[in-house]
Image: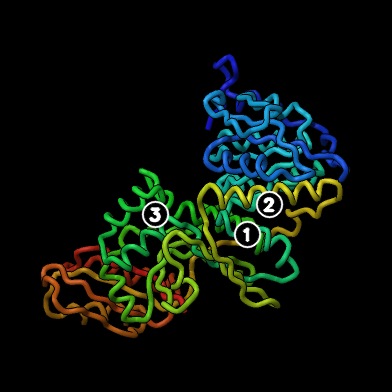
Amino acid sequence: MEFISPAGRTSYVESMPKKQSKPAVSANISSSKDCRVALIGFGTVGRAVAKILCENPQPNLHLTHICNRNFERKKQPWVPAGVVWTDDVQSILNSDVDIIIELIGGLNAAYPIVRSALEAGKSVVTANKQLIARQGPDLLELTASRGCQLEFGASVAGGVPVLPALRTGLCGDRLHGIAGILNGTCNYILSRIEHARIPFSEALEEAQARGYAEADASEDLDGGDARAKLAILALAGLRTRVVPESIRARTIRPIDAIDFDYAAQLGCTIRQISRADLKNDGLLAEVGPCLVPLDSPFGRVQRNLNLVLTSGQYGGDMAFLGAGAGGDPTAVAVVSDLMFVAEGLSGKKRSAASQVSTPVVSSDFETPWYLRFYVRDQPGIVARLAEILAAHRLNIDALLQKPGFDKASLPFVITLEPCRDSALHPALEKMAELDFSLRPCLCLPILR
């Protein structure tokens, strides 16, 4: 979102103050003084945040400003008369507010606003996953140098308090793995295909009609949204700095109803899973559709819910389940962060940027595999595939073929015993050259 000056000519992104040569004075306040709060962005989540603050006021929080373009059309009668409405971001940065809530999203406008606020010694609460995934470590370092706070609990699994749990409840453990269903759009679509056995295109149309998916849902379907969230979880839980683009993302678009039939024969279903595991000095990480057991926590998550599992050296496995999207659940997470910041402004906070490593990122997981083929039926197909697999030292576990399909476009499945991703893909390249293959092989990890 771009904010326009009252004169309608200048973007406030362009008029941000330049980086200061000396640290600004900390915005720490005493516990007896109210925190003055400014809300930037009055969309679905921003409106819900404002409503909570106005209808359920906290003794140490005072909403003083709401900033949004075309704010005259956004004004609500339930907002107290003393709240200043504006489209001037600079006036908020120059004001005496203690905490800024950034809810405009994206990077181009949000990053300079958040950075300028922190440089001015103001604490920030944000739900901006792209901002934190890409600039989080640098912003946290800036936060520590200015004596303020940056909280982003709503940036992953909006209504599920997994990031606050990583910050407080699990910070005493040494986490080595995080996995999750982080995108409600994909989970809704896959759940609909599973239960109604409808085509992918029809499930996507339903998700768009219900408001779960945008008209252009590429960021969800192709894994971009989930890998940004996984990068944030890796920062908060595994203390690793990961560029989202270094995480491989596989699309859910090739998933057919027949894949759920075959998955069921294996005691599984299909979900988009984001996973990251610390291995020696590296990080294994990827996002994509996987087969998961029907009786597993992932297999039981339906529709647009989110689930995050953490694995720790001492505490073992923990699970966090709930509504991952929507104005109200996300607003609750934002206000929770806001209250946490208000409580901590009078005391010195531990830097969240401490002891962050930058590991080499790889997708070379070792798992069993599900390979689904569409072929033009002819003698010797299985023998040719088995020959290629044997040449690459890959072992077949099972062969599945449902009857009743057109021989001109026949789906069948081969499952493989555990092997590394890097060992499997040269074999897949050879299989793609076979003349009876009608579509690229669908290759899914099987998680146990």
The residue under the point 41% across, 72% down is 445
The residues tagged by marks 1 and 3 sit, at their Cα atoms, a distance apart of 24 Å
- Which amino acid lies under the numbered mark 1 shown in the image of this protein? Pro
Residue hosting label 3:
221
Q: Earlier in the sequence, mark 3 or mark 2?
A: 3
Residue hosting label 1:
161
Q: Give the SS element for disc 2.
A: helix
Residue hosting label 2:
336
Q: Earlier in the sequence, mark 1 or mark 2?
A: 1
Residue 204 visible (yes or no): yes
Q: Give the SS element for disc 3.
A: helix
The residues tagged by marks 1 and 2 sit, at their Cα atoms, a distance apart of 9 Å
- Which amino acid lies under the numbered mark 3 shown in the image of this protein? Leu
Q: Give the SS element for disc 1.
A: loop
Q: Give percent across and percent down for residue 365.
A: 49, 72
Q: Residues within 10 Å of mark 2 (few under 14, many from 20)?
A: some
State whether residue 350 is above or below residue 258: above
Q: Give percent across and percent down for residue 47.
A: 57, 39
Along the line of sight, the residue nearer the viewer: 334 or 288: 334
Q: Residues within 10 Å of mark 3 (few under 14, many from 20)?
A: many
From the viewer's perspective, tell me whether residue 366 is left or right of residue 3.
left
State whether residue 265 is above or below residue 131: below
Q: Give percent across and percent down for residue 216.
A: 37, 44
Q: Residues within 10 Å of mark 1 (few under 14, many from 20)?
A: many
How did the renderer colour the structure?
rainbow
Along the line of sight, the residue nearer the viewer: 176 or 188: 188
- Foreground disc of the pair 3, 2: 2
Say whether marks 1 and 2 touch (CB < 8 Å).
yes
- Which amino acid lies under the numbered mark 2 shown in the image of this protein? Ser
The residue under the point 58% across, 33% down is 109
